[in-house]
């Protein structure tokens, strides 16, 4: 059972009584057939987290039952899509939540490192924090060569187009709830993480990265574990970068044309 969002948290063997910054923290876990891994993820989430929402994205195993047994709130999103599952879970968060943390349900991320993500929010230096697997310690084989290349290319393009430096599109991330609402997220599948980072750069959101650990996942990845997933994710990420880049370029040209006509 999670602590009430209004009671300031409670202590246990994981240590902290309240979240860094005394935030009310809601954790979102999109999950598709993660029965084998999910319990270990949920059990490792810090006690100061007020609410955990697992978005069951059409699982055919016992994912939802495991989540409920571990004290998480389960919402159902039968239409497949990582972004769609995240959106469904975010919509279920109560208004009292100050910070939203996203983490995968496959045990590749390390929930015990969640405080590292919240610290820049707590000290006022950032509104959006990405856990970088490139800067942290990775188990051998936890990321495929194509993932490493794709992340690097996407981050390079974001820096060249918007001037925002990232090293990773990692799923383990924390963002102020108000900031997240302002991003008006729309992607329904593979482009969720890159869309969030691009929109943050476009809006001048204060972004930082912190090193996080990354492990080999339990089970088979729905993205990197299949050729279709790899191609689909890579294509969608590049599409979103191109779409948003062209949109900004057109907007700049439109502003320039208006200025010229008024001179």
Image (cartoon, rainbow, N blue to C red):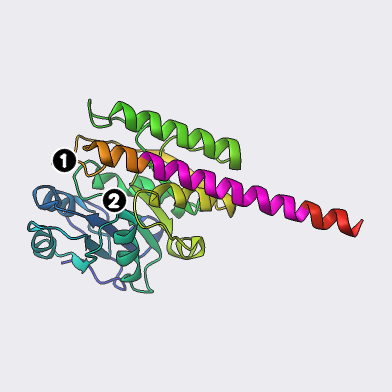
Q: Position of residue 176 (x, y in %)?
A: 44, 60
First of labels 1, 2 by sequence position:
2
Q: Is residue 68 visible?
A: yes
Labelled disc at residue 220: 1
- Of residues 137 and 67, the one nearer the viewer is 67
Q: Specify whether residue 71 is painted magenta.
A: no
Q: From the viewer's perspective, is the residue at label 1 or at label 2 nearer? A: 1
Q: Is residue 172 left or right of residue 182?
A: left
Task: In the rendered view, tell whether residue 83 sits above or below residue 158.
Answer: below
Check disc 1: other Cα within 10 Å, few if <14, some if 14-19, many if 20+. Answer: few
Q: Specify whether residue 241 is painted magenta.
A: yes
Q: Is residue 191 left or right of residue 92?
A: right
Task: In the rendered view, tell whether residue 173 sits above or below residue 142.
Answer: below
Q: Position of residue 151 (x, y in %)?
A: 40, 35
- Of residues 12 and 194, the one nearer the viewer is 194
- Residue at screen point 25% across, 58% down: 80
Q: Which residue is mark 2?
A: 103
Which element carries disc 2, helix, strand or loop? loop
């Amino acid at each position: 059972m999670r602590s009430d969002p209004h009671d300031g948290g409670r202590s246990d063997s994981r240590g902290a009584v309240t979240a860094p910054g005394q935030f009310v923290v809601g954790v979102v876990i999109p999950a598709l057939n993660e029965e084998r891994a999910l319990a270990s993820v949920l059990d490792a989430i810090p006690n100061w987290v007020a609410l955990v929402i697992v978005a069951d994205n059409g699982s055919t195993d016992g994912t939802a039952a495991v989540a409920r047994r571990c004290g998480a709130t389960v919402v159902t999103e039968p239409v497949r899509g990582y972004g769609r599952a995240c959106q469904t879970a975010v919509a279920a968060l109560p208004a009292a939540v100050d910070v939203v943390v996203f983490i995968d349900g496959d045990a590749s991320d390390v929930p015990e490192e969640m405080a590292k993500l919240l610290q820049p929010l707590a000290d006022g230096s950032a509104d959006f924090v990405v856990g970088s697997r490139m800067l942290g310690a990775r188990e051998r084989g936890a990321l495929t060569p194509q993932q490493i290349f794709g992340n690097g290319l996407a981050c390079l393009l974001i820096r060249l187009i918007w001037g925002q430096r990232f090293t990773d599109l990692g799923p383990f991330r924390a963002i102020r709830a108000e900031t997240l609402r302002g991003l008006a997220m729309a992607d329904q599948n593979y482009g969720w993480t890159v869309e969030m980072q691009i929109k943050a750069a476009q809006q001048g959101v204060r972004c930082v990265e912190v090193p996080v650990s990354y492990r080999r996942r339990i089970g088979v990845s729905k993205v990197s574990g299949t050729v279709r997933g790899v191609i689909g994710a890579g294509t969608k990420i590049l599409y979103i970068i191109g779409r948003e880049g062209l949109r900004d370029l057109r907007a700049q040209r439109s502003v320039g044309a208006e200025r010229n006509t008024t001179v």
